[in-house]
Image (cartoon, rainbow, N blue to C red):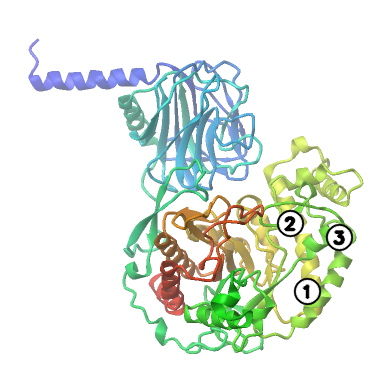
Amino acid sequence: MFMSRFAVLGLIVFLAAVGTAADLHSGLAGHWQFDGCDGKIVKDLSPRGNDGVIDGGELRKEKSGTSLELDGLGSHVLIAEKTLFDFSNAITASLWVRASELRDKTVFFGVPHTNESWTTPMFGMYASEDHVVYGMWGNHGATKVLVETAGALPLDTWTLLTGTYDGAAVRLYVNGTLSAEKPHTGAIVRNGQPLILGKGLGYSKPSLKGRIGELRLYSRALTADEVRALFEQTQSAYDLSAPPATKPAHGDGTVMVETHGNSPTSSSPWRQQPTRLLELLKGYTPSGESVKLNRYGGRLDQPKEKATGFFQVKKTGDRHWLIDPEGCRYFNIAINAVREPKDVKANFGSAEKWAEAVTSQFRDNGFNGLGNWSPSRLQQVKSPLVWVLRANFMFEFAKSKGLTEAASGTVGFRNRCMPVFHPDFEPFCDRFAKDLAATANDPMLLGIMTDNELQCPVNLLDRYLSLDADDPGRQAAAAWLAARKGSDNAGKITLRDRYEFIAFAFERYYRIVTKAIRRYDRNHLYLGSRINYHQGEFDNPWFWKMLAPFHDVVSVNYYHFWGPQPAQFAEWEAWGGRPILLTEWYAKAMDVPGLANTFGAGWLVRTQEDRARYYQHFALNALEIKNIVGWHFFKYLDDPKESTALDNAGGANKGMFDAYGKPYPPLLDRARAVNREAYPLIEFFDERNRP
């Protein structure tokens, strides 16, 4: 029979498609999807028959088919390798996923390393900041290999992630398109751990919050054409459209700033971060110079609240405000740890002259406050800035009982368990709080903080249960768990149990310390204990609900995010409804000779101009978010190179000023520019974002 050239070409295309479809079944070592799933067991559709056990999660209908929605609190699928996957020197792992939140080191799937704190799985995928990493370990001492997506994983959008290894290179594809590759050799090793979807081994890494559609494993490396065919053949089950915008796109310009984690020794690659700048803000005309301020830094040209002589908080519409002693709206912009620089007499004349000069310098550059660790000398100048007081109730109590140990950035407790259940803690707090009466009538005092970054490991409950049988903390934890579950058997403890216990333990702490504070100082705001744990605090709804009755303002040391994240602050508002003060954040640059920059949680960038750009980006994001009422930049001075302390050895470029009190001009200039615009920018953002 005669066939036209076009018919022949059509037949070839058809046969190629059929052939490709057939190839996608060759070497299939595991295939799990949720169509027809009973919510308890997900069948393995491959010949190996390794069915998965579902622990938590909800089945959701998709465009065609079904997905499993995981809650980010430990829900997962566990797949025991009853029949060996038989990977040797080749593998393909392909996952359809729709993440609704992406915390650093979130696990998508994988066979974890036996050391649960290690990030790289035997094979699998996880999040590094907002990028996706495919990782593997090799045999006989072969080094691990990590390949990372070129761009960030979009949230609330279905994406097919595929990792392959063919014995010579590891490749990572996004929606069928190659995103990254790296040479690698060595066999794939087994370690006896199960394959887990949605979480890691133990609880040291965040669980996935979002939906998983299906996971496929092959004992061979799919070719680039096959990976593309897999995407084309399976995408019809999912709605691939991006989520509707929560607010209009305003077209603000950005520049790119490169970051490298928080240390030059980091294994993370340098990444480009889109960064907002004041001059690139579409439609904004600076007007901060015309805003009239009172001595506190409150705005005089807006409606006033009732003056109380002290700071208060108020929510006007959907915007939280600090209200200064005269009743004016006030946004707190401060610097932490303002201490005397080196050679103060030679450079400033005297410590007293330095105090006057630095106070004027801060005010001239748009700062209206002093943060944590600032000396009393600065409250004795002619026109002092608003300040905060910190009272270390728990630290001093634990020291008095010999229950502390070394820790970075805070005071550590034995087994990381604060002795909050000790019967002597409450009477100690009452005695300790008496000193607060000395500043109870100071109108320049914004409020009182307690302790700093209290230790809060995710396994706090387990740690209390491991204490000696006669320890009050052990007894309290066992009683709590018995009342909840009828047993203190650690094998039955879930992540939700751990999160709710964190709220239980910290409720006791805040209830005791705020009661003591209010007995001796009823005038000032309670600003909290400067929380900083991403797991167990930031992502814990029970913790935020617990905070609300005790806090006027919640202080947050905000690290490892490229500026405040609106969705996260919306969650905190929904869970607790309290205003937020961002009490630590910074970036350090590599262009200061002699500073190691290996310690400190702030971002590492290349130059002072990059630090300056990050400051503006952070500030603009903060001013736009309506439950943020201020920020405290960390910090005044660099850590000098001769530093030896646990969290600053070798020095670090943390300061807005060097160790001698000399400013870094790019950073100070950009800080001044945005600080002075704080009030007009708030108005601008509120009007622009009005529904």
Q: Secondary structure at mark 3?
A: helix
Foreground pick, 410 / 131: 410
Q: Are marks 2 and 3 in contact (CB under 8 Å)?
A: no
Image: 113 above or below 503: above
| Residue 521 pos. (x, y %) | 77, 79
Viewer-nearest of discs 2 and 1? 2
Say which label, 2 or 1, has the lower sequence index: 2
Image: 256 above or below 673: above
**Residue kind at label 1, given as amino acid type:** Ile
Q: Are marks 2 and 1 in contact (CB under 8 Å)?
A: no
Crowd band around label 2 with a 10 angstrom C-alpha radius: few (<14), some (14–19), many (20+): many
Q: Residue at left 32%, top 32%?
A: 232
Q: Residue at left 76%, top 43%?
A: 462
Say which label, 1 or 3, has the lower sequence index: 3
Q: Gap between marks 1 and 3, in whole Å?
A: 20 Å
| Residue denoted by label 3 | 400
Image: 661 above or below 78: below
Crowd band around label 3 with a 10 angstrom C-alpha radius: few (<14), some (14–19), many (20+): few
Residue 39 placement: quadrant: top right
| Residue denoted by label 1 | 517
| Residue denoted by label 2 | 411
Would you say residue 77 is visible in this rendering? yes
Q: Gap between marks 2 and 3, in whole Å?
A: 13 Å
Q: Secondary structure at mark 1?
A: helix
Would you say residue 691 is visible in this rendering? no
**479 lies left or right of 121:** right
Foreground pick, 190 / 156: 190
| Residue 619 pos. (x, y %) | 47, 68
* The C terminus - image quarter: bottom left
| Residue 680 pos. (x, y %) | 42, 79
**Residue kind at label 2, given as amino acid type:** Val
